[in-house]
Image: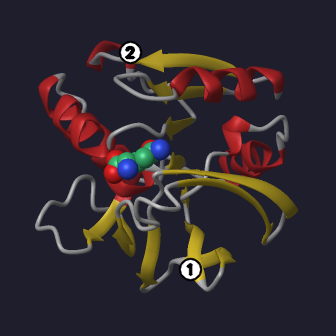
Amino acid sequence: MKIGVLALQGAFIEHEIMLSKLGVTVCEIRRLSQFTDDIDGLVLPGGESTVQGKLLHEVGLFEPIKTAIEKGMPVFGTCAGMILLAKKICGDETVHLGVLNATVKRNAYGRQLSSFVTEGDFKGVGKVTMTFIRAPYFESVDDGAEVLSTIGGNIVAVRQNNILATSFHPECTDDLRVHEYFINMVKGCKRG
Ligand code: GLN
């Protein structure tokens, strides 16, 4: 299995380490030529969604990635990656890939509680340590998007068919189970 990690900006190396520990082949995606047909799934890392969105257009990866997700390529977005996936951003006209039926609120925890670590239940995985860094959460989800985790009433993990998104950073812990959940998604997803 070969998993691409978008490596334009942000915390991509941490994902690469997790995926390598799970025994999959990892390739960094920075250019269109690296986004090849043999990639079984893609990780969109945390970082700065506005910058990442802009860079995706600049390097010509925006449309190919959007199309591949719409055709069923499994994708896992963390934090900024989740913002890129959402159909709507609260109070903002910007839509990036717009493939996930959910409304996301950026920097949702404000300045006082901008970064924190907690524990929460993740459906299908169990209790996991969750690291939030200037994190978004989902205000709401629509058709086909299943809530996998909430913290204090806020939605922090969602799955919609081939799309997985988390507000928190599982790559900032030693716990491989959320990445393993994604790998199992990739194994189960049929591309069409
Ligand atoms: N606040 C960032 C954004 O809006 C996301 C933060 C993160 O990825 N850790 O893009």
Residue that extends furthest to the front in the rendered view of this protein: 112
Q: Which residue is drawn at 53% across and 61% down?
A: 113
**Residue with the mark numbered 2:** 34
Q: Distance between the residues labelled 1 and 2?
A: 36 Å
Q: Which residue is drawn at 83% across and 47% down?
A: 177
Marks 1 and 2 close (CB-CB < 8 Å): no
**Total numbered labels placed on residues in the image:** 2
Structural crowding at the residue carrying mark 2, measured as other residues with C-alpha within 10 Å and reported as few (<14), some (14–19) or many (≥20): few
In the image, residue 50 sits, relative to residue 72, either above or below, namely above
Q: Position of residue 2 (x, y in %)?
A: 63, 24
Colour scheme of the rendered structure: secondary structure
Tell me the amino acid under the disc marked 2. Answer: Gln
Q: Where is residue 153 in the image (x, y as percent from the top left)?
A: 61, 86
Q: Residue at x 69, y 27 (%)?
A: 1
Left/right placement of residue 131 relative to residue 71 reads right
Q: Which of 94 and 4 is in front in this view?
A: 94
Local SS, label 1: strand
Which mark is first along the chain, 2 or 1?
2
Q: Can residue 184 be seen in this view?
A: yes
**Residue with the mark numbered 1:** 154
In the image, residue 55 sits, relative to residue 69, either above or below, namely above
Left/right placement of residue 24 relative to residue 4 reads right
Tell me the amino acid under the disc marked 1. Answer: Asn
In the image, residue 5 sits, relative to residue 175, either above or below, namely above
Left/right placement of residue 111 relative to residue 129 reads left
Local SS, label 2: helix
Q: Can residue 70 be seen in this view?
A: no
Q: Position of residue 99 (x, y in %)?
A: 34, 62
Q: Residue at x 36, y 56 (%)?
A: 83
Left/right placement of residue 33 relative to residue 10 reads left
Mark 2 Cβ inside 8 Å of ligand 1: no
Q: Position of residue 39 (x, y in %)?
A: 52, 28
